Image (cartoon, rainbow, N blue to C red):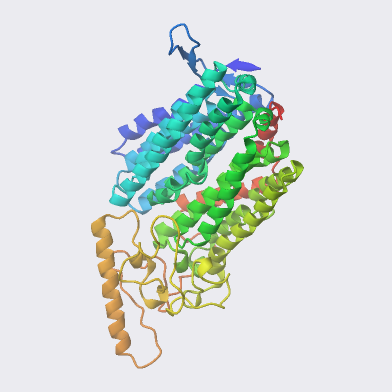
Amino acid sequence: MVEQSLRPLAAVLVSAVAIVLIVASYRHPNIRDSWSVAAAVAKFGIVASMVPGVLGGESYRAPALEFAPVPNGPPLRLALEADALGVLFALLASLLWIFTSFYAVGYMRGLDEHAQTRFFASFAASLSAAVGIAFAANLVTIFLFYELLSVATYPLVAHDEDGEARAAGRKYLTYTFFGGGVLVLAGTVLVFVLADTTTFGATAQALGNADPTLAKAAFALLAAGFGVKAGLMPLHSWLPDAMVAPTPVSGLLHAVAVVKSGVFGIARLVLEVYSPAVVADLGVGIYLAAVAAFTILVSSLIALRQDHLKRRLAYSTVSQLSYIVLGLALLGPTAVKGGLLHIPAHAFMKLTLFFCAGFIHVETHTDYISEMDGIGERMPLTMAAFAVAAAGMAGIPLVAGFVSKWFLLIGAVEVEQTIFAIALLVSGILNIAYFWPVVYGAFFESPGEADSKPLLEGPIGGRFGAAAGTGSGPAVATDGVGNDADDRPDEADDSASPSTGTYAVDRNPSDHLSTDEQEQRREDAAEAVDAEADAEENSHDDTDHHDVVHDEHGDHGHGGTTGDWEAVGWTGQEGSWLMLGPILAVAAGAVVLGVVPYQAVFLHLIEEILTGVTF
């Protein structure tokens, strides 16, 4: 049953109105940031108000705008309708935007970032476009908001305004706006030609009766176009490069809006533009599943070789998104349920991980995994939340990832695609392999006795390999664009650790500093190394002399004279609660989804979605 309502339109417009209020309050940061939080709460309230009706089989349709591109031809409609699938995505995005708003305030103020008004305005625009994608009633509308999302998030990716950020922003637009957008437009036009409509649910029968070659071509165009934002290989390389953006943006890109819009588009494509039955008749599902499985495994292997924490998380995202695509492509009810459930499961877990990475950066200016050994003493709650989310990403029980991956595994067996079940199991092992060293190093190693990182250059935990800091281990190698070692200042080598007297804050300047500030830090680090070398030459005992003075930037939590982290206990003293609070709240959400999945509304929405799908 369809109910005429302005609520879908209001959910889109509330953050658009917030843009005006944020910009108008640029002279008053507290008021400006309050508008961002208020808009997030209002958006969530509007979306949540539609959940009971949607669970009862209703959908909410806003007034449409119609126009005819061809005289006397069928009209095109710009229409918004909140159905079960759309509410699933919109509810997730609006809920997590609340926590991200608080976190972003703490992050931007903690680093005294520039252009904060532009940042929060772009954030609001991005969420407006994301909800527009969720509530789009046809391919034309979803294409419009799909492109608006790329434009709205560009200022966030290029926020730092240096050469690297601008290059990443150009690459992001090239892939998502010009690449993915053009492919989606081409697929939309072809569907319109074949079916005389682009309305979801009304195209499947016509496409099933259309010329199979053209129907397959339309599917391939749309899958590739949405696959750009979903990070399907080989269309993924924009995503790790976008890590130059501030961490709240990384959370937005990798957990809430952009990448989820890609997998959401594929969900609309498989479930409503074609339907699983038509996809099976055309025989294109197996090819999509093969691409997804390839992406899952290869991106996991690349993640193993990343020493920069955010880049490791980025390649993990590439892998995890393809779990969703694989579940949809297997075309079985249980597999589709697992794929759709992994949308919120991955969002809660990955947002927690990025929040933790950003908090570590703000408090310690540490970005490299090889420099985080023992950091659990300095940030115990943060690293505990990281461990919980990482366990869920690997499919460990009691966290959200276990439930969704269980459905995926059973679903693959049900449709007799054992090869994909094996790929899922192998991927789970790889997830443990690239998250375990981070957690183990944080809680069970100390800076002076840690193994070399990343994993493919050393053993899994323990102290059986070359100790970091001795210079005897192999050089760190990474994949992707550039080399993590090459990105570090020339004055320090990869084998250095905090115990050498050159702290991470000096050797790895923030991505969000100006060129002059970064150069100044490098000069300070070089002077510190020279001073320490002179002190060691004059010393005749085994006492370490690592009391490096950081006049401007401080040591950010390192303590003592051994390079160990300062122990702060489990009472929340590790930093601002504007950031720590959202970390713990989102991590708790991941546990709730894993322990009581049926009490969380997302699984009920997914079951409602499946009632209208033809398998």
Pick out the residue farthest to the bottom: 540
Task: Look at the picture and state if 223 lies above or below 363.
Answer: above
- Is the C terminus in the top left, top right, bottom left or bottom right quadrant? top right
Residue 426 percent across, percent down from the top left: 65, 56
Number of labels in the image equals 0
The image shows residue 495 at horizontal and vertical percentages of: 41, 74
Q: Nearer the viewer, residue 417 or 538?
A: 417
Horizontally, residue 582 falls left or right of residue 34, namely: right
Query: Which of these two is toward me, 330 or 4?
Result: 330
When the figure is inspected, residue 332 is found, relative to residue 520, above or below; the finding is above
Q: Residue at x 50, y 25 (%)?
A: 188
The reply to whether residue 11 is visible in this rendering is no
Specify the quadrant of the image occupied by residue 19: top left
Q: Position of residue 504 (x, y in %)?
A: 38, 67
Which residue corresponds to the image point at 49% horizontal and 16% vertical from the top-left?
Answer: 77
In this rendering, would 223 be left or right of 529? right
Q: Specify whether residue 433 is in view.
A: yes
Where in the figure is residue 12, as x and y percent of width and height?
47, 27
Q: Quadrant of the N terminus?
A: top right
Q: Residue at x 48, y 40 (%)?
A: 228
In this rendering, the answer to whether 529 lies above or below 296 is below
59 to 96, vertically: above or below: above
Dividing the picture into quadrants, the one containing residue 69 is: top left
> In the drawing, does residue 544 fall left or right of residue 318?
left
Quarter occupied by residue 45? top right
**Front-lying residue, 406 or 25:** 406
Q: Residue at x 46, y 55 (%)?
A: 310
